[in-house]
Amino acid sequence: MIRNMASSATCIFCKIIKGEIPCFKLVETEKTLAFLDIQPLSRGHALVIPKHHGDKLADIPDDSLAELLPIAKKLAIASGAVDYNILQNNGKLAHQEVGHVHVHMIPKPNEKEGLIIGWPQQATDFEALKKLHAEIKEKL
């Protein structure tokens, strides 16, 4: 149950956390919930969500993010997946469908099931990359 954590009355994941919508719960801790995806890309596709509501990764306090990857790892092991993707999208252009941070654990049993992606690599301009490196480092 949510205790002293941000939530949204209209968010489907917040409703799942509150028990207003049922789910196939796999793991629950004070700050995290994991459950099977009801529109899976493959057998065992699961979601891991922080109980703190936030649309994007930068909206979630670090302490509410700490369990996401360790739980995704446990799910991957428990599913028996040999190959799998761990995916976290931020924003509609980045293919985020639900406005609540979530991590997908998607088993990849074969070429047709699981996540199918393209990777449109760009030619490297090392001078531009050097400038970008300096810009990012300055803000860290």
Image (cartoon, rainbow, N blue to C red):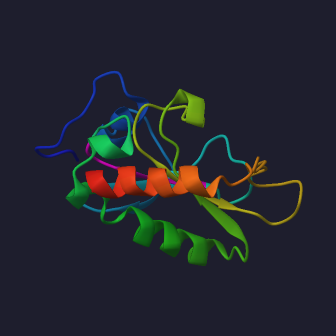
Q: Is residue 124 visible?
A: yes
Q: Main secondary structure of the magenta part?
A: strand
Quadrant position of residue 75: bottom right
Provide the residue span drawn in magenta: 46-52
Q: Is residue 31 visible?
A: no
Relative to 39, say whether 98 is above or below: above
Residue at horizontal 41 percent and vertical 72 percent from the top = 70
Residue 48 located within the stretch drawn in magenta: yes
Say whether residue 15 is left or right of residue 119: left
On the image, the x and y values in percent for residue 36 come to: 56, 52
Q: Nearer the viewer, residue 93 or 136?
A: 136
Farthest residue, direction right: 111
Quadrant position of residue 84: bottom right
Relative to 37, say whether 78 is above or below: below
Residue at horizontal 76 percent and vertical 49 percent from the top = 117
On the image, the x and y values in percent for residue 111 come to: 89, 60
Say whether residue 107 is left or right of residue 34: right
Q: Nearer the viewer, residue 22 or 86?
A: 86
Relative to 139, say whether 16 is above or below: above
Q: Nearer the viewer, residue 91 or 38?
A: 91
Residue 127 located within the stretch drawn in magenta: no
Q: How many marks?
A: 0
Quadrant position of residue 94: top right
Residue at horizontal 28 percent and vertical 54 percent from the top = 138
